[in-house]
Image: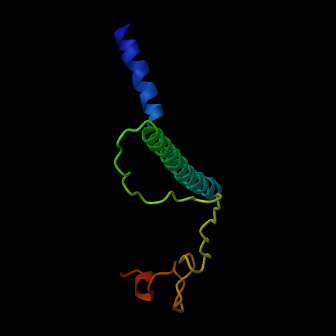
Amino acid sequence: MKTALALLLAVFSTAAMAKLPPPSPEAQAKAAEAAARTAWTGKVDGYKLCQAQNKTAAAYFASARAAGKSVHEPASTPPCADPGPFVYTPPEAKPLEAAGAHSPSETAKAPHNTAAPDAATPKQ
């Protein structure tokens, strides 16, 4: 029983360690846009948190002053930065020529699949 379980786990762990194929360019572009949207969402969340903290602090200081308590001046903080609407501009893909996916620029002197003339003739 233990041997069968060990064998079964070994088979499934080997399948789990299989290498996945690289993502397609469309999938990479979609992932980059999703990452940009996630980063923007984080900035929006930070902006909303900043506004809520400022509103809460202002209400606290106003109620404390109205109650006659002595309050210190609030610490100066940078203003809340509004990230604006989400705008994603995908990076421009290099053309194949700029990516180095073409033949070398020098002129070929011989076909690439031929041997040197001396090597073609057998020595006796």
In this image, 31 relative to 124: left or right?
right
Q: In which quarter of the image is residue 95?
A: bottom right
- 120 vs 78: above or below: below
Residue at 48% of width from left, 43% of height from top? 62
The foreground one among 39 and 4 is: 39
Question: Along the line of sight, which residue is nearer the eye, 16 or 47?
Answer: 47
Count of marks placed on residues: 0
For image coordinates 39% across by 19% down, the residue present is 7
Residue at the far front in the pictured view? 68
Which is more toward the observer, 36 or 49?
A: 49
When asked about the image quadrant of residue 2, the answer is top left
How far from the left and from the top, in percent, is residue 75?
A: 36, 54
The location of residue 94, given as percent across then percent down, is: 59, 74
User: Depth check: 44 or 73 in front?
Assistant: 73
- Residue 41 vs 86, above or below: the answer is above
Image point 36% across, 44% down: which residue? Answer: 71
Residue 109 in percent (x, y) is at 51, 92
Above or below for 70 versus 27 = above
Q: Quadrant of the N terminus?
A: top left
Does residue 35 sit above or below 108 in this rendering?
A: above
* Rendered image coloring scheme: rainbow
The quarter of the rendered structure image containing the C terminus is: bottom left
The residue depicted at 59 percent of the width and 80 percent of the height is 97
Residue 9 horizontal/vertical position (percent): 41, 21
